[in-house]
Amino acid sequence: MIDLRTLRDDPEMARESQGRRGASPELVDQILAADALRRASIAAFEQLRSEQKTMGRRVATAQGDEKVALLSHTKELSVQVKEAEAAQAQAGATYDALMAQLPNLAAPEAPAGGEDDYVVLEHVGEPRDFAAEGFEPLDHIELGRRLGAIDIERGAKVSGARFYYLTGVGADLELALVNMAMDQARQAGFTTMIPPALVKPRAMEGTGFLGQAADDVFHLPAEDFYLVGTSEVPLAAYHCDEILDAGSLPRRYVAFSPCYRKEAGSYGKDTRGIFRVHWFDKVEMFTYTTVEESFAEHQRLLEWEKQWLGKLELAYRVIDTAAGDLGLSAARKFDCEAWIPGQGKYRELSSTSNCTDFQARRLNIRGRFDDGVRPVATLNGTLVAVPRTIVAILETHQGADGSVRVPKLLQPYLQGRETLDPIA
């Protein structure tokens, strides 16, 4: 959530952020009005409670008719106190509901607009020219079938649409990618973790995934658990209700976890293959640091992602995501999009977001600094989303005979194999 003092002191900044997100600037004014009503209701309740306590002391020493009159007034006052308490609770609930809708303030550098208003920051590498090489590239579905790596038909038979099996070299490829990604993060100073994939509502709400993203979340209502769509959720909640020592920052964690998404709103999109699925495994980086240092850390996370894509020898571009496509928690987000030959376009493989102190305020995560205790900043960055990365590798590094060349730095993680060869 946003620091309320920021809204009170500079509401125009929040209105401007809302406008660049394509959201309602009026929400800011609604919050300020609700805050004023909430504060007034608190003051009214406290005044009546004080009067009630004073009246109770007077009743204790009063006699005769005075006591009867005071008791009568006390009963009336008791009703007023209950009404004021209810009004305070309602005003607080209204304020909380409105604040929960307000996204993080988009960074001034983030482009205004929606999904298609991103800015391309750089291109790295050139897409392969298969026509110049004299053959028509296959998509990952056919390559996966020939390699014995992906079984979509049985995935659908067992679990339904957007599920799959990784088999043989497909399973080996996932394990190789995960191990290489974890090694890279470990060498960069990250603490490796395997977090729970089921979390309580507070973790989902605190990270901003029960607002506009709620329709994409799998919920187990009987137990009131949520299946996470990213390990960002349990990593962010790991230090909830804690005060971190300033000297321990930055704290960097990297987690391997399964991820689950309904893919709500994606009807008709990427229906073939394993690019957009309901379950996938992922390696996610996460950092706790100061707000002041978060901007430099964001660049570091991006550089680690670029380093990773370079190891896989993929052509990619980096985009600055537009404000309207940031999601609730992010102030700024960079996406790394690899060229996917089967689709003839760049598609997101990884992203990194600076959430400043938005999630930390919701989850009550603070740092103890020389000048006092205040919320920290949180950042996240995907190192490898397995299915999409497999798609990019198979389609980019395929040969005319249906084999797939293994990137040199990945070979030690695949038992030294230089190619993945067709079995059918």
Image: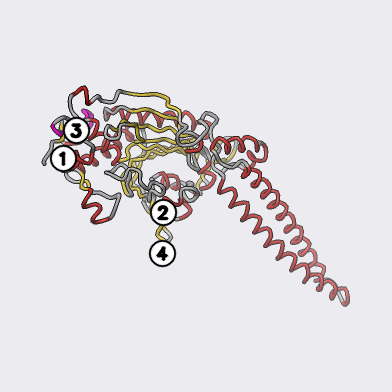
Q: Earlier in the sequence, mark 3 or mark 2?
A: 2
List the single residue furthest toward the right: 65
On the image, numbered disc 3 is attached to which residue? Answer: 412
**Which percent across, then down, holds residue 59?**
81, 71
- Disc 3 is placed on an element classified as helix
**Which percent across, then down, holds residue 134?**
17, 24
Q: CA distance from mark 3 to mark 4?
A: 45 Å
Q: Earlier in the sequence, mark 2 or mark 4?
A: 2
Q: Earlier in the sequence, mark 2 or mark 1?
A: 1
Label 2 CA crowd tier, 10 Å (few <14, some 14–19, many 20+): some
Q: CA distance from mark 4 to mark 1?
A: 41 Å
Query: Viewer-nearest of labels 2 and 1?
Result: 1
On the image, numbered disc 1 is attached to which residue? Answer: 147
Q: Do the CB atoms of the residues marked 3 and 1 lie less than 8 Å apart?
A: no
Q: Which residues are magenta?
A: 401-412
On the image, numbered disc 2 is attached to which residue? Answer: 199
Q: CA distance from mark 2 to mark 1?
A: 37 Å
Q: CA distance from mark 3 to mark 2?
A: 35 Å
- Disc 4 is placed on an element classified as loop
| Amino acid on which the number 1 mark rests in the picture | Leu
Q: Is residue 410 magenta?
A: yes
**Which percent across, then down, holds residue 177?**
26, 37
Q: Do the CB atoms of the residues marked 3 and 2 lie less than 8 Å apart?
A: no
Q: Is residue 195 magenta?
A: no
On the image, numbered disc 4 is attached to which residue? Answer: 222
Which label sits on residue 65? none
